[in-house]
Image (cartoon, grey):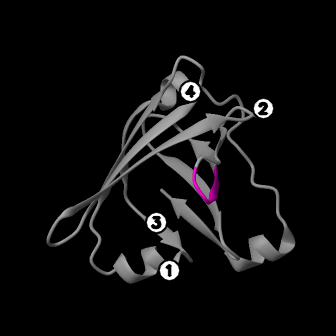
Amino acid sequence: LRCLLWAGAEVPVQLDFNAEKFAGMLHVAAAVSNCSIFLKMKDRMKLSIATISFTPKGDLAMKLVWPLPDRCQKFEVLFQRSGQAGHYMDTSAQEKMDLHVMETHYSHYAIVHKLQQSGCEPSITLQL
């Protein structure tokens, strides 16, 4: 993960990305990250669920639920569409997040790359 940051690698997105086909419920079967919060919680995490929808303006709304042994951790993020289909950004908080749909078969799988920059330590998360 850090090699991607150091190299400044361009993250690819799905060719001919179709937002309408991508909307719906996704089961996150695997995730890796160098995020300190993720690293603290990863051993207690179970299969998570992401619900994806799109606003009339084309922005991506994501609701994530991470089941933990004692509770469910919920997150909601609204990503603004960028000039490239399959690439979305969130700059509303003190941190900046970029989301790229790298590859998807829509009904079977998706590989999603998220770059989060807050403070001085950027983190990368890949989800399948």
Q: Earlier in the sequence, mark 4 or mark 1?
A: 4
Whole-angstrom CA distance, mark 4 to mark 1, is 30 Å
- Residue under label 4, please give it: 19
> Which badge, 3 or 4, comes first in the chain's sequence?
4
Q: As displayed, is residue 122 above or below residue 16?
A: below
Q: Which mark is residue 83?
A: 2
Tag 3: residue type?
Ala
Q: Is residue 87 left or right of residue 114?
A: right
Q: Position of residue 124 (x, y in %)?
A: 61, 67
Q: CA distance from mark 1 to mark 3?
A: 14 Å
Which amino acid type corresponds to the residue marked 4 in the rendered image?
Ala
Q: Give whichever of discs 1 and 3 has the lower sequence position.
A: 3
Which residue is painted at 76% across and 71% down in the image?
Answer: 4
Q: CA distance from mark 1 to mark 2?
A: 30 Å
- State the separation of the CA atoms marked 3 and 4: 22 Å
| Residue that label 3 marks | 31
